[in-house]
């Protein structure tokens, strides 16, 4: 993973939040010259995501500490698997522990949850949304990819998505698509959200490239696919659950978007244990 200035700032903020003016417990108990080895281990079956981020946390605290990944990001591991080995000043290991594990637990949770959801889908691509933790979007969408999912647009700047509030402001699907086509540059695809088959027909007639079928039941989604006949890319969205995903994919839509991949994925359990020390 390449670290942009944004990700560096995020790690700095997390360390500042946790460390403040100093780790008073470690400063009081651990001599600076004490060296040690620690292992980060999975406490449940999970898909690993975020080891480079965890390594960067420790690197920022002390560049002499050696962070050795044992497992690659994207691998599924069983309970008890050692994910990484740390060697260096014990004080650094203890001070960086919680921040590093917070990143690792959250991102691995998203990757694990995504892998479980992707396993339910055949014939369609499962994509994330912009329902991400503020500041964490790049990391969370990276974790979705590690779990086998795909990314929707990253922000408001890289894709036109005309939603219901835009339609209320503009007045009609046809007018909104026409204005977007006139004002957006030629490399941007235009997607419009519809809630019924009448809206779908209007969006098709207006020449939308992609159509988001919002909160339609499975039978209506099937009708939408039949009406479209390949004239636009179809994305199903809203009320997606693990049990429903196979049925939605079977309707023939091209994409299924699922906000839960990032906003509701539970963190997984990993821990760090000091194995030995020396001077």
Image (cartoon, rainbow, N blue to C red):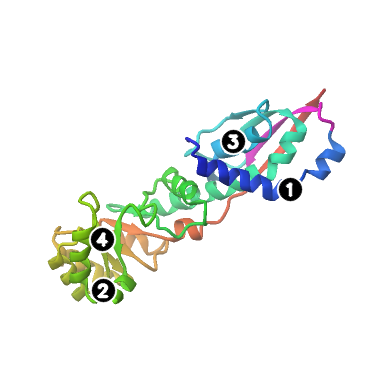
> How far apart are labels 3 and 1 at the CA level?
18 Å
Residue 155: give x, y in percent of width and height.
Answer: 39, 54
Using the image as rendered, state which of residue 172 and residue 123 is in the foreground.
172
Residue 113 percent across, percent down from the top left = 48, 53
Determine the residue located farthest toward the front in the rendered image.
Answer: 183
What kind of element bears circle 2?
Answer: helix
- Percent of width and height locating residue 38: 70, 32
Which mark is first along the chain, 1 or 3?
Answer: 1
Query: How far separated are the C-alphas under marks 1 and 4?
Result: 45 Å
* Disc sitting over residue 56 in the figure: 3
Vertical order, 195 against 100 (above or below): below
Compare residues 133 and 76 and report the one nearer the observer.
133
Residue at (77% x, 29% y) in the render:
276
Identify the mark at residue 154; answer none if there is no mark. Answer: none
Give the residue pinned by disc 1. Answer: 20
Disc 1 to disc 4: CB gap under 8 Å: no
User: Dot 3 surroundings within 10 Å: few (below 14), some, or many (20 or more)?
Assistant: some
Residue 174 position by quadrant? bottom left
Circle 2 crowding by C-alpha within 10 Å: few under 14, some 14–19, many from 20: some
Mark identifier at residue 191: 4
Q: Is residue 111 left or right of residue 31?
A: left
Element class at badge 4: strand
Give the Cα distance between marks 2 and 3: 46 Å
| Circle 3 SS class | helix
Q: Quadrant of residue 67?
A: top right
Q: Along the polypeptide, which appears first: circle 2 or circle 3?
A: 3
Q: Which residues are magenta?
A: 31-44
Which residue in the structure is indicated by mark 2?
170
């Amino acid at each position: 993973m390449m670290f942009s200035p944004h990700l560096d700032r995020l790690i700095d903020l997390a360390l500042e939040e946790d460390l403040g003016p100093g780790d008073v417990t470690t400063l009081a108990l651990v001599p600076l010259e004490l060296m040690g080895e620690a292992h980060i281990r999975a406490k449940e079956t999970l898909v690993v995501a975020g080891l480079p981020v965890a390594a960067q946390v420790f690197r920022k605290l002390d560049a002499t500490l050696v962070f050795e990944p044992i497992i690659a990001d994207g691998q599924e591991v069983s309970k008890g698997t050692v994910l990484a080995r740390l060697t260096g000043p014990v004080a650094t290991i203890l001070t960086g522990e919680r921040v590093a594990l917070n990143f690792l637990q959250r991102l691995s949770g998203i990757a694990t949850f995504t892998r479980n959801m992707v396993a339910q889908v055949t014939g369609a691509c499962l994509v994330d949304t912009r329902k991400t933790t503020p500041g964490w979007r790049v990391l969370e969408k990276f974790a979705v990819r590690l779990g086998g999912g795909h990314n929707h647009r990253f922000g408001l700047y890289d894709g036109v998505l005309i939603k219901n509030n835009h339609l209320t402001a503009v007045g009609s699907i046809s007018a909104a698509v026409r204005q977007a086509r006139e004002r957006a540059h030629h490399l941007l695809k235009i997607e419009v959200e519809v809630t019924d088959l009448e809206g779908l027909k209007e969006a098709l007639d207006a020449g939308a490239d992609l159509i988001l079928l919002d909160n339609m039941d499975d039978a209506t989604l099937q009708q939408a696919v039949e009406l479209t006949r390949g004239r636009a890319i179809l994305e199903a969205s809203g009320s997606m659950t693990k049990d429903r995903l196979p049925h939605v994919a079977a309707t023939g839509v091209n994409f299924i978007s699922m906000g839960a991949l990032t906003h509701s994925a539970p963190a997984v359990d990993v821990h760090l244990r000091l194995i030995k020390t020396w001077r």
